[in-house]
Amino acid sequence: MDFETIVAPATAPGRSGVAVIRISGPLALQIGGNICGEVSQPMLLRPCSIKNSDKKTVDRGLVVFFKGPASYTGEDVIEIHCHGNPVIVDLIIKEALLQGARVAEPGEFTKRSFLNDKIDLAQAESVADLIAAQTDSAVLGANISLSGEFSNKINVCIATLVNLRVVVEAAIDFPDEETPDEDVRSLVESANDQIQFISGLIRGSEHGALMREGLGVVILGAPNVGKSTLLNCFAKENLAIVSDTPGTTRDLISANINLGGVPVEFVDTAGLRSGSQDSIEIEGMNRAKKAVENSNLVLEVVDAKDFHGFERLNENSLLVFNKVDLLEGAVPGEGLFVSASTGEGILELIDEIMKTAGLHPGIEIPALSRRRHILCLEKAKESLEESVSLLKDKSSLELVAECLLSAQINLGEITSPVSSDDLLGEIFSEFCIGK
């Protein structure tokens, strides 16, 4: 493809020991040679004097040439390693612009890699996920997707659907011959196998999306039940003010914590009670209710001393009975009993949070996924289920073929969309410039 030559810093802005400027496109080798001298030998990182158009030395560093298609973008690529001074970086980029390059758009290097068939779209997305990963498990999951493991599973399923379509289309070509029951049963069995396969991919993708996006957990409860103490316990620092005075927490206070490889944002909220005339406290309670609507999980904290005297605030919440250390005698009944002040029962509570989110101990790290992947998989599954229903009802094979084609197209949207301009624009806009 005949692209313009693009340039951008590949390292983060600011001062550092080393900065890297990346140039990709048909003029990359020429521009690299003009700035750094002879660079025609690929894969050789060599010292160079970095000069401007007046042949004055801007810096001394290293330069390497990657000849396309054996490069990240599939094009000729030059990488210049200079000292990490923003002034030096800007001077080098300005020189490249004077010689015919333009500044790269966000994610444009990775976009070119996709367009030049170096990676598929799911792998391209995993590059951004790898950069944005907040936990070690998210890093491992992004690398699983980047390696092509997730894409390979999608492609295997697509290949199977193509074979099913061939069988159905062949039967359509001979309308005078009734399709034997044995062939119909075979088609139904094969389609059901793919439904089960896709169902497994959906479960894994939901876990992968959770590891990518994180979990939002709201701590809800009446005043003085220990919500702020529980937040501080999770965060292992005093983020929220703890007081016996009702209504101390007025605004939302959050803490981002790594729980078993999943980034979890815990949000402490104002205590919910009726009869307050304080406008600020009322606003705090309204914000608490709004936070619940946007959360993945709600922890409803109850004072364990009032085990039988509380009114449920949220029917879908996970009940947590706090202040168990102040109880006299045995814990009454069953439930999640903790002491946010001493830490008793907190590990069990964390386990329950993870289980409720669908992440059980010992679960294999999945490939990081996106919500669009899950949506595509669900649509493909629905089309396959419809094809099975049509086959069992001995409906028109043309309809069956359309369902199989729809499933194939939806799976293809994950790795290699047929019409992708809007989708690519949305995906690559999330990238940083220079990647």
Image: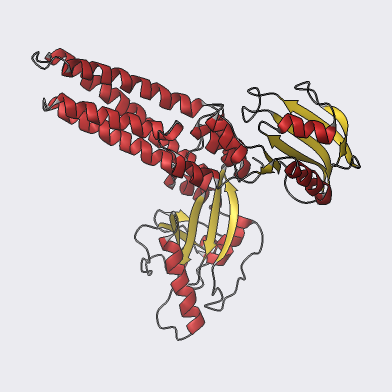
Q: Is residue 249 above or below residue 259?
A: below
- Residue 286 lies left or right of residue 15; in this view the side is left
Work out whether residue 310 can be spotted: yes
Q: Residue at x 79, y 36 (%)?
A: 80
Residue 312: name its quadrant: bottom left
Of residue 224 and residue 156, the one placed in the foreground of this image is 156
Q: Is residue 52 above or below residue 238?
A: above
Residue 107: name its quadrant: top right
Work out whether residue 359 can be spotted: no
- Residue 95 lies left or right of residue 310; in this view the side is right
Q: From the top left corner, tell me how far across and down residue 132 is, in percent.
A: 60, 45
Q: Residue at x 27, y 17 (%)?
A: 166
Q: From the top left corner, tell me how far across and down residue 302 is, in percent.
A: 45, 65
Q: Residue at x 79, y 46 (%)?
A: 89
Residue lying furthest bottom? 277
Q: From the top left corner, tell me how far across and down residue 168 is, in percent.
A: 21, 19
Residue 316: name its quadrant: bottom left
Q: Residue at x 51, y 72 (%)?
A: 224
- Residue 23 lies left or right of residue 116; in this view the side is right
Q: Quadrant of the N terminus?
A: top right
